Each structure stands twice: as C-alpha cells, then as structure tokens.
Image (cartoon, rainbow, N blue to C red):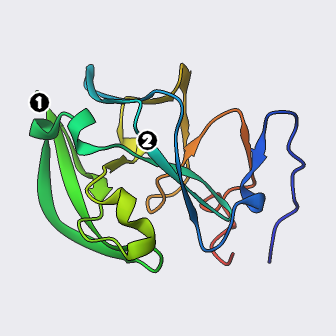
Amino acid sequence: MRPKYIQPGPGQESVWDYPRPPRLEDVTQNIRVVFNGVTLADSWQAKRVLETSHPPVYYIPPEDVKMDCLSLTRRTTVCEWKGQARYYTIQVGNKKAADAAWFYPSPIPEFEALKNHVAFYPSRMDACYVGDEQVKAQAGDFYGGWITNNIVGPFKGDPGTLGW
C-alpha cells in the first residue's frame, strides 16, 4: 500500500517523484563522510542514485576516499538495477564499523559510471554531509539513503513500510 504523498515545498524533492528503475546523476555539492574524527571521504565528484520511495544514496569515487581505512569483507548483495555489491569494514584508530560501506565492482551497463565508487551507511558514520548540511540516515539496517532538508518522504525503511 502506497503511503500518502507529501507535497514538496519550494526547493524540495519528493522521493515519490523519483523514477523506477532508478536514475544516476552527478552531484554538484561537496560530499563528506566523517568517522572517528577523521574525514574518510571528501568529494566534488560524487554521484547519487534516485529511486522511488528512497532518499538518495551517494557514491564517492575511490580517489576521494581514504581507502586505507577500508577493508574488503565477504559480504555481497545483489541489486536488481545495479548488480552485485561488495562491502567494506571501516576502521579508524580503535573504532570499527563492519560492512559499513559498499561498491559495485562490475555494475550493469546502465550504472557503469558507479564502478568502484563507495557508498556509506550514514547510520554507521559519525557524520555525513551534503554541502554544509549533516544528513539524517534512512531508517532500517538495509537502506543507505541520505536524508536532507530538501527531500520529503515518507521513506522506505520507516516503521510500517515493509510491504511497499
């Protein structure tokens, strides 16, 4: 059952206006990820994926990520749109977050531009930023959407959304 549509205000986007299948687009703002007091990622070259009912997921090119803080894990998942994802555990100093970031080593052709770009679960980081705004994490352990003030839901992952 689709939830009630929230009318976006000026300068806002509704996740219910995002497409299915998802769309990939370049990001024009600075994207930053902080973990254990260290900036893990800082990019002006990020991309975002927009999919119906989900806040955007941001993907950062590996050259803009402190890859020495990431270690590949055994976890894999499959996205019907992007292909098979691999996961990273993040460690900075004595703080560790298992399977807290993911990437697509061989995405399907429509998402080739995402190859090896890293996405982070904002719920497992100290802070994630779009421009100067600290994002809120999409609810649930499966989703990695970044919620900013210019995005309105309701969002997949919130309580009661399992059947969407």
Identity of the residue drawn at 64% across and 62% down: 156
- Relative to the observer, which residue lies in front, 7 or 95? 7
Residue 1 on image: x %, y %: 80, 78
Image coordinates of residue 16 in percent, x first then y, are 76, 61
Question: Looking at the figure, which quarter contains the C terminus?
Answer: bottom right
Assign a secondary structure to mark 2: helix
Q: Which residue is mark 1?
A: 94
Q: Is residue 148 above or below residue 39?
A: below
Q: Can residue 82 be spotted in the picture?
A: no
* Relative to 5, residue 59 above or below: above
User: Could you say whether the residue bearing mark 1 is in a helix, strand or loop?
Assistant: loop
Of marks 2 and 1, the one in the foreground: 2
Q: Name which residue type carries label 2.
A: Pro
Name the residue nearer the viewer: 106 or 157: 106
- The disc labelled 1 sits on which kind of residue? Asn
Give the residue pinned by disc 2. 122
Q: Residues within 10 Å of mark 1 (few under 14, many from 20)?
A: few
Query: Residue at (32%, 74%) from the top-left corner?
Result: 77
